[in-house]
Image: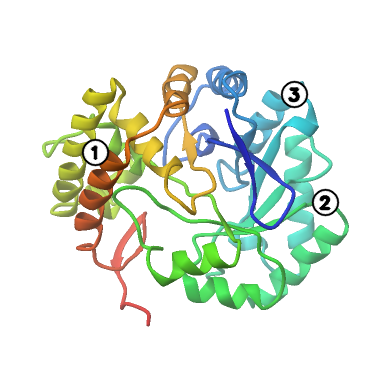
């Protein structure tokens, strides 16, 4: 598997990043099996994945602890680990202790990239948080700083107070809210883009149809893309995916991940997996290419759908916000 580096710093990233949210045993995804989760991480590593993404919020540290167990015997210089600072820990007195707790859970001396998971929802000035993150960087407890789920205005405000090397937005064939001037800005300024949810929490796997229902306990029951008419529009993109999957003898999920890998400006997609079998299947997105014609066909279908979407608060909240100018 190929490797690249976060645009402005010497942090190596594998072509696919393994996401571990689903392993956190939290209420959004439900119960996960610890042994199977560890096996999934090992399967990813054996398949060439050397970059792993987690967060304290994924089960209040459970995902971090589990990842720590799984990577314990992996050579530290060969792996890259991302984790995230949760909203309640963004005040000056909590940033460093929160990072140190995550490092203990992971069994590491330093984090390769430490993200702010979400902008503050309690009025904590972003400068206060960034100053402490810069202190962690100076103390070599983190190698680089990232932000996740920040809109363009929030990103540029955070950038005033320190170095931001990477962003982690939601981005896929059916969710492209950073396109346009924002995407161009990141590319021009060497900000790495490591997107999450490349399969739109299962929509792009091709296993759902317009009759699919999710239980109230499943977080997708309220996520905007799973509501009609948006769900129906997303399934039209899936129809193209299925046609290309048949042509290339791949699964729709593998084609969707491949499209992201080939998208100029994307550093590497974060791809989750509940078990080793699913992870092994996702790894088949590497080692081949979509033709330019097929890439463009899929990209066109994607844009035709995503350009019709209202400005949702985020992937998990169907609240429609005014468009920022």
Provide the residue designation for mark 1.
214
Task: Give coordinates of residue 35: x percent, y percent.
Answer: 58, 17
Residue 216 in view, yes or no:
no
Seen in the picture, residue 262 relative to 119 is either above or below; the reply is: above
Can residue 96 be spotted in the picture? yes
Q: Earlier in the sequence, mark 3 or mark 1?
A: 3
Q: Secondary structure at mark 3?
A: loop
Q: In the image as oriented, which residue stretches furthest toward the right?
A: 139
Query: Which is closer to the viewer, label 3 or label 1?
Result: 3
Circle 3 sits on which residue? 74
Dot 2 falls on a residue whose secondary structure is loop
Q: Position of residue 59 (x, y in %)?
A: 56, 41
Q: What residue appears at the point 81 percent right and 59 percent down from the top-left corner?
A: 136
105 on left or right of 199: right
Location of the C terminus (image quadrant): bottom left
In the image, residue 89 above or below residue 234: below
Question: For mark 2, what is the residue?
Answer: 141
For this view, does 265 lie left or right of residue 6? left
Image coordinates of residue 61 in percent, x first then y, are: 64, 41
- Give me the residue at 71% from left, 31% from top: 68
Q: How is the image coloured?
A: rainbow
Mark 2 vs mark 3, CA separation in Å: 19 Å
Judge by depth and name the residue closer to the eye, 133 or 289: 289
CA neighbours of label 2 inside 10 A, class few (<14), some (14 to 19), many (20+) = many
Instruction: Tell which circle, 2 or 3, labels the residue nearer the N-terminal end.
Output: 3
Mark 2 or 1, which is nearer the eye? 2
When asked about the image quadrant of residue 259, the answer is top left
Please give the name of the residue rendered at 53% of the width and 73% of the height, measured from the top-left corner.
154
Q: Position of residue 201 (x, y in %)?
A: 35, 40
Q: CA distance from mark 3 to mark 1?
A: 38 Å
């Amino acid at each position: 598997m190929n490797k690249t580096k976060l645009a402005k710093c010497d942090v190596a990233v594998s072509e696919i990043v393994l996401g571990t949210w689903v392993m956190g045993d939290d209420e959004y995804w439900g119960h996960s099996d610890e042994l199977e989760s560890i096996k999934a991480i090992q399967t990813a590593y054996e398949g060439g994945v050397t970059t792993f993404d987690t967060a304290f919020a994924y089960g209040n540290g459970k995902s971090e602890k589990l990842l720590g167990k799984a990577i314990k015997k992996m050579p530290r210089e060969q792996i890259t680990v991302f984790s995230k600072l949760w909203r309640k820990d963004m005040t000056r007195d909590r940033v460093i202790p929160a990072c140190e707790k995550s490092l203990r859970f992971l069994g590491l001396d330093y984090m390769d990239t430490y993200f702010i998971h979400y902008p503050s929802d309690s009025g904590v000035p972003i400068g206060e948080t960034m100053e402490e993150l810069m202190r962690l960087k100076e103390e070599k407890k983190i190698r680089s700083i990232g932000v996740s789920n920040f809109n363009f205005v929030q990103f540029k405000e955070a950038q005033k107070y320190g170095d931001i090397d990477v962003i982690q937005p939601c981005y896929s064939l059916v969710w492209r809210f950073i396109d346009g001037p924002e995407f161009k800005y990141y590319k021009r300024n060497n900000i790495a883009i490591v997107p999450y949810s490349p399969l739109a929490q299962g929509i792009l796997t091709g296993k759902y149809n317009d009759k699919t229902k999710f239980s109230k306990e499943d977080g997708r029951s309220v996520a905007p893309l799973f509501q009609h008419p948006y769900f129906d529009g997303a399934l039209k993109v899936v129809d193209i995916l299925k046609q290309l999957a048949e042509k290339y003898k791949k699964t729709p999920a593998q084609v969707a991940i491949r499209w992201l890998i080939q998208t100029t400006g994307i550093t590497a997609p974060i791809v989750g997996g509940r078990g080793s079998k699913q992870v092994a299947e996702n790894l088949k997105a590497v080692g081949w290419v979509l033709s330019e014609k097929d890439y463009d066909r899929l990209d066109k279908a994607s844009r035709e759908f995503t350009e019709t979407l209202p400005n949702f608060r985020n992937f998990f909240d169907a609240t429609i916000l005014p468009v920022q100018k």
